[in-house]
Structures are given as C-alpha cells and as structure tokens.
Image (cartoon, grey):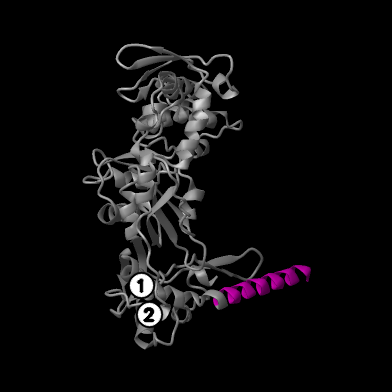
C-alpha cells in the first residue's frame, strides 16, 4: 500500500508540474507550431538567418519537422573581429520532443564564448553534422584559415575529411578538445589510479615538444595499447606543443560556458586603454613574476632568459625548463607559449621589462579593446508582440517527428511467460497516417490528438516517446 501511495503522489506531482508549465508557457504542440512564426519575427526585426528542413506529408500544407538552423546577423558581423577559432558541440534537449541542440561559438577579446550559430535537430549524425557545418560556412563565415575545435568523434571526422570540405586545410584546421580526448582514452583504456589519463592531459597541454615526447614515453610504458591508439591521432590535432598557434591556446570546449549563451548574452563592459581588462590584469600579474628571471642579450634581437632566481613562486619551481631563448623579431620563445597563445610569455615579459620595451605591440589584435568593441557593436531591435508576428513564408505547418516505440511486451499465462508484440510495418504506418490525415481537422486538433488517433487505429497504447 505504501508503494502505491508513493506512486500516486509522484503522479500527482508530475501532473501538477505539467499543468503549471502549460499555464505559464502554453501547450507543447501549440508552442511548437509557433516556432516558424518566431523565426520569421526575428528575421524581419533583426535579420535572423534561418534554414529549415522537414519531411513532406500527404497534405502539402503540413510537414514533419527534421531540423532548423539559425544565426543572428549581429553574430555574423561580430565574429569578423574575433580570433579565427570556432568550437562546436551538441547536447540532448529536455522536454517532450526528444531533440538535440547543436551550437557553434567563437571567442571574444576577453576570452569569453561568443555565440555564432544554433540548430535543433531530431538526431545527431553524419548527415546532421554535415548540414550544420555546411550552413556555418554558407551563412556565418567564409574566413580562410579557421581553427575548428570539436570532440574526437567519427561522425565529425567523416564530415571534415570528406572531398570538397571547407573545414580541412587550407580552408580550416581541425583540432580536438583535449578534455574529451582524455575522457575517451579513459573509457577505452581504464586505469584505476587515473594516472595514465593525467599523463595524456599533460602531454596535450605541454608547450614543448621534448616535454610532449617525455609524457608519451611514460604513456607507452604504462599503457602500450593506449599509446598505440593515441599515436594514430596526428599530434598537431590534440597537442599544444605541435600546434603552431592556430588554436590560440584553446585546448578544451567549456560546455558550461558554451551552452550558457542559450540563456542570455553576456553583459559587455567597455573600458579605456588598448587591451581588455583581462589582458591588462594578466600583464600586471605576469610582469611581477617575470622580474625573477635573468636576461642576457644575444644577437639579432634574441635574448637568453635564465632563472628564475631565489625569489620565485612555487609555480616557477615546478617548471622543468629554466632557460629559454626569446626572439622578438619572430615573437617566439623556446618555451612555446609566446607563439602558441599569441601572447607574451613570462620569458618575453622579462625581456620587455629588462630592456624597457613596451610589450603591448606584441599582443595579438584579437585581444584589443577595439576588437572587443567591434565584436559587440551591432545592436538588436525589439521583437514585436506575438500578435504582430508575420507568417513564415514557404514553411508549412510543422509537426514534431514521430518516434516508433520498442516492441510491447504482453504477459502470457503462467509464470515467466511473455511475448513481444511486433510494431507495425512501414506500409501499415503509411496507410494509417493517410487515413487519419484525410479526416482530421487540423485547425481544431493538436498533434497529440492525431498521434493518439493513430495509436488507436493500430491498437497501440503508446506510439511516440513523449506520450509515455
């Protein structure tokens, strides 16, 4: 009895939650039908770029939703002033319709995620990744030399490497998220002490090739099979030491920050000076630390930086290489950080401080206040009231995609006996749908009504996932 009471209480709470959501935000099916009008309103008021894909139904005025892509024209303009780096990822959406969200983002001058493009799709596959990445190239940016950072996933690899792709060299340079790669390594080659995963992370984060090789040697000793798997992945795609600065030091996809832009755009605080507050703060901290190094001039604007001396922090004591060569003509340092991040390292700052050289000209323009301002210069116009939203031209009335359930198990007589009821065939589904579409009044009926009618005609208690 207690178990039944708990179950009844949960059911009541779930029903109450559904009713509260419906009162606040409206009916699921009705809201879904408003999406094309919302996109149309954003297009007319703010120049939203939209691309729809759907499957036709017998009635040409109706269609089954497949996916939609959108990007704000303000983001298209703003990205021209961001560093040439794009990260993409996807996630499962909550709610009734079991769909996926895809997102592409850049980075502004303050190291913050800058939203570029979005898509909602019924599935994430090679086809949907191809469609999403192609739309980014067509509608958002045609910049050459972009660095694309993604998860190490076979579907994305297939799309990037297909003939004619504009996401491979020389149009773009594909790199992998180091955090995801480490997690993938850990799943494939379990290590109870997590030490090998740590070594992979250290190898990928190292800025010097000798240090990278040292970590790879340790990985080979502890996990030969893991090393073989890792060795098949080109090091320039996951290791900072083998990157020539294309990824601007961005080694991971911060999923929390990436998907936070779906809730709201960040507040932008403009400041005086040449570079953003984050850059200037980093300068001040690094200049203090760089004073511990000893600088010796060499030939042709090259300097040997030794140390650090006795007054150093614990962070410096952890450094494996105490002596580096800084070449100002090339903006490089043998530590690797200067050229990899397009930002002066501690050794370069030590040279600037010793030689009384202004370090700001050696910082990439993507970190400047001017770039920051231009990134967010475009403004948004107010969206009109819902009653004034225009109809979406050329887009039929859309219904969520139908998902067939697993075979229903019907208990037989006797203990432990059961048999599965086979789902309807494609031909049976097609005929049933055609019969219903002929008689249903779409102005008065919701999508749920149609699906329930379909379920009854096929004698299925539940037909789609969101009716469970």
Q: Is residue 20 magenta?
A: yes
Looking at the figure, which quarter contains the C terminus?
A: bottom right
Report the side of 420 relative to 237 (left or right).
right
Residue 17 percent across, percent down from the top left: 62, 72
Report the side of 33 relative to 310 (left or right).
left
Q: Are dots 1 and 2 in contact, CB under 8 Å?
A: yes
Q: Main secondary structure of the magenta part?
A: helix
| Residue at mark 1 to residue at mark 2: CA–CA distance | 8 Å
The magenta segment is 1-22
| Res. 234 in view | no
Residue 41 shows which numbered tag?
1
Q: Does 177 sit above or below residue 449?
A: above
Please state which of residues 361 and 448 is positioned toward the viewer in this rendering.
361
Q: Does 180 sit above or below residue 15?
A: above
Residue labelled with disc 2: 388
| Quadrant of residue 42 within the rendered picture | bottom left
Q: For the view shown, which residue lies furthest in the left direction?
A: 164
Report the side of 243 relative to 456 (left or right).
left
């Amino acid at each position: 009895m207690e178990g039944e009471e708990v179950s009844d209480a949960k059911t009541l709470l779930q029903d109450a939650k559904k009713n509260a959501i419906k009162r606040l935000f409206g009916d699921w099916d009705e809201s879904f039908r408003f999406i094309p009008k919302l996109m149309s309103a954003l297009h007319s008021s703010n120049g939203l770029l939209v691309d729809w894909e759907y499957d036709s139904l017998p009635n040409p005025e109706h269609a089954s939703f497949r996916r939609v892509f959108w990007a704000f024209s303000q983001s298209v303009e703003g990205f021209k002033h961001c560093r040439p780096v794009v990260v993409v990822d996807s996630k499962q959406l909550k709610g009734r319709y079991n769909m996926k969200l895809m997102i592409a983002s850049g980075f502004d001058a303050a190291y913050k995620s800058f939203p570029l493009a979005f898509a909602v799709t019924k599935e994430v596959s090679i086809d949907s990744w191809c469609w999403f990445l192609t739309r980014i190239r067509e509608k958002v940016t045609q910049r050459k030399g972009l660095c694309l950072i993604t998860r190490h996933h076979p579907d994305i690899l297939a799309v990037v490497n297909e003939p004619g792709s504009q996401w491979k060299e020389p149009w773009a340079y594909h790199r992998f998220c180091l955090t995801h790669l480490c997690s993938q390594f850990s799943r494939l080659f379990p290590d109870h002490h997590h030490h090998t995963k740590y070594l992979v992370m250290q190898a990928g984060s190292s800025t010097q090739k000798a240090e990278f090789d040292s970590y790879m040697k340790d990985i080979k000793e502890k996990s030969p099979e893991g090393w073989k798997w890792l060795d098949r992945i080109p090091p320039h795609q996951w290791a900072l030491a083998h990157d020539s600065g294309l990824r601007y030091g961005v080694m991971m996809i911060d999923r929390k920050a990436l998907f936070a832009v779906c809730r709201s755009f960040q507040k932008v605080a403009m400041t005086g000076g040449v570079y953003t507050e984050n850059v200037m703060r980093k300068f001040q901290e690094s200049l203090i630390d760089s004073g511990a190094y000893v600088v010796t001039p060499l030939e042709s604007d090259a300097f040997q930086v030794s140390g650090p001396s006795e007054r150093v922090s614990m962070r410096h004591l952890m450094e494996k290489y105490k002596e580096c060569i800084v070449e100002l003509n090339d903006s490089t340092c043998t530590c690797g950080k200067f050229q990899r991040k397009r930002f002066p390292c501690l050794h370069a700052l030590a040279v600037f401080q010793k030689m009384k050289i202004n370090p700001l000209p050696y910082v990439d323009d993507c970190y400047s206040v001017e770039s920051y301002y231009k990134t967010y210069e475009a403004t948004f116009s107010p969206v009109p009231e819902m009653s004034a939203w225009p109809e979406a031209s050329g887009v039929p009335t859309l219904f969520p995609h139908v998902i067939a359930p697993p075979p229903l198990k019907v208990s037989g007589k006797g203990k432990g006996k059961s048999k599965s009821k086979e789902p309807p065939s494609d031909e049976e589904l097609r005929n049933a749908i055609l019969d219903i579409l002929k008689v249903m009044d779409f102005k008065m009926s919701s999508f749920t009504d149609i699906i329930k009618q379909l379920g009854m005609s096929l004698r299925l208690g539940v037909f789609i996932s969101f009716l469970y």
